[in-house]
Image: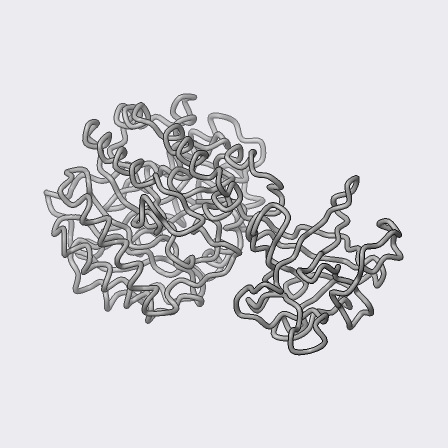
Amino acid sequence: MASSSRTWLLCSVFISCTISISYGRKMTAQTSTRVKAVNLGGWLVTEGWIKPSLFDGIPNKDFLDGTGLQFKSVTTGKFLCSENGGGSIIVANRSAASGWETFKLWRINETTFNFRVFGKQFVGIDAKGNGKDVVAVASAPGVSGTFEIIQKPDDSSRVRIKATNGFFLQAKTEDLVTADYAESSSGWGDNDPSVFVITISGRMQGEFQVTNGYGKMAAKVMKKHWSTFIVEKDFDFISKNGLNAVRIPVGWWISSDPNPPNPYVGGSLKALDNAFLWSKKYGLKVIIDLHAAPGSQNGFEHSASRDGSQEWGQTDANIQQTVAVIEFLTARYAKNPSLYAVELINEPFSPGTSLQNVTTYYKAGYAAVRKHSSTAFVVFSNRLGPMEPTELFSVASVLKRVVIDVHYYNLFVSAFDNLTVQQNIDFIYTNRTKDLNTVTTSNGPLTFVGEWVAEWNAKNPTKEDYQRFAKAQLEVWGRATFGWAYWTLKNVNNHWSLEWMIKNGYINLLT
């Protein structure tokens, strides 16, 4: 978890005191071994912040899917805007840029794109009018909605936008943007209405971005990543350092391997097969975690969203497609002794995913698991954001071997920014203990701290401070009746890498 793209999501969770809750059965002697796990994040579902170098070879990697661009006309001095957020014309009359003034890229190749606006419509040329007015009314990209971005050779912040009719977009006036400007000999000066200064308002680096960005090269790049980022010796390391399980995030396209829908590429299923093989060899449990659902359940890069939109669960067909993924995975590994749990979905976000649709999916997903396994635990993640923390009680109370997954971080929320080392540690012992106690009862659900990390915003902490902070979390999370999982095994950011933390003496799980 925990890239900067999740900040708003986690702020919402903290402010609204969201806690994921469901019921399960009391832990028996057969299930008394608590999970001490590590997440294999950034492996089978890409998160660019975990391994930025994975994106280094993409041509024009600044313009990937989901990149937010804001265009300021050099002649009007104002920003392009989709009037009313979409469904109308494009104007050039906004003095400041926000949502309506941001255009999300859908990448066709390194220079050609579709532009999606706030209301999810696509920019194009109005075919019903004079054939040159620029509008945002289409619900899907069409031929007239394909644009080429041409950057000034010595100043990439200055661009022209070429339409399929061969002409450039121009801000004719503040209220009129047209695609009828011919090739100019005036250079890139401030008197040219086809010149815009761009600002990148946001980027995404997930599975869709990396595979679509590499295009024909993606299969080779991803197979190399899957075969080198996590390898057999990592499972040996995990088993020898006090851990007994791995939580493996996967994407929905894995069920279509070896020929998943474009732009995803085949090979992740083989990597997951290897993980089960190695887990069996080294005596580790496996928690399969559907981290990225079709359409994206939360709009962030870690759920493989193309442009930040959250569209999972809005149709019955989408829900049934997701259930089919869960059934595929459970059926494939049900007889493997390492299969311990299946997490139906990671962090669905409300209000975009309604309680009714989440409930419908959890019932169907649970049944899909039970169709093939009576022993695998089924992990529920409550909706994040504005919701009632007990909203899943009625669903989970009649189900067996159900686990709740709560993610706890002392990060991303402004309330943590000015805490001292000791205040952060006290927060774990006091506040997080209370949070965990709320969802932990003797006859209720099993509880799982599915993501946590020994990173924080404390000012100038020493190694000893980190050790104390990690120890506090291990003590509190150790009371979770199902267990915990560190995020993540490997990461370029050292404290997010459990491997680095163990090798460098920050965390010791053997004592």
Name the residue located 39 percent from the left edge and 59 percent from the top edge: 348
Q: Residue furthest bottom?
A: 129
State the residue in front, 92 or 506.
92
Name the residue located 73 percent from the left edge and 57 percent from the top edge: 71
Q: Looking at the rendering, which quadrant does residue 387 occupy?
A: bottom left
* Image location (x, y in percent) of residue 354: 38, 69
Q: Looking at the rendering, which quadrant does residue 311 occupy?
A: bottom left
Q: Residue furthest front?
A: 166
Residue 271 can be seen, yes or no: yes
Is 151 situated left or right of 351 in this image?
Answer: right
State the residue in front, 280 or 405.
280
- In this rendering, the answer to whether 359 lies above or below 233 is below
* Image location (x, y in percent) of residue 123: 63, 65
Is 260 situated left or right of 304 in this image?
Answer: left
* Image location (x, y in percent) of residue 150: 72, 49
Name the residue located 18 percent from the left edge and 60 percent from the top edge: 367
- In this rendering, the answer to whether 185 lies above or below 270 is below
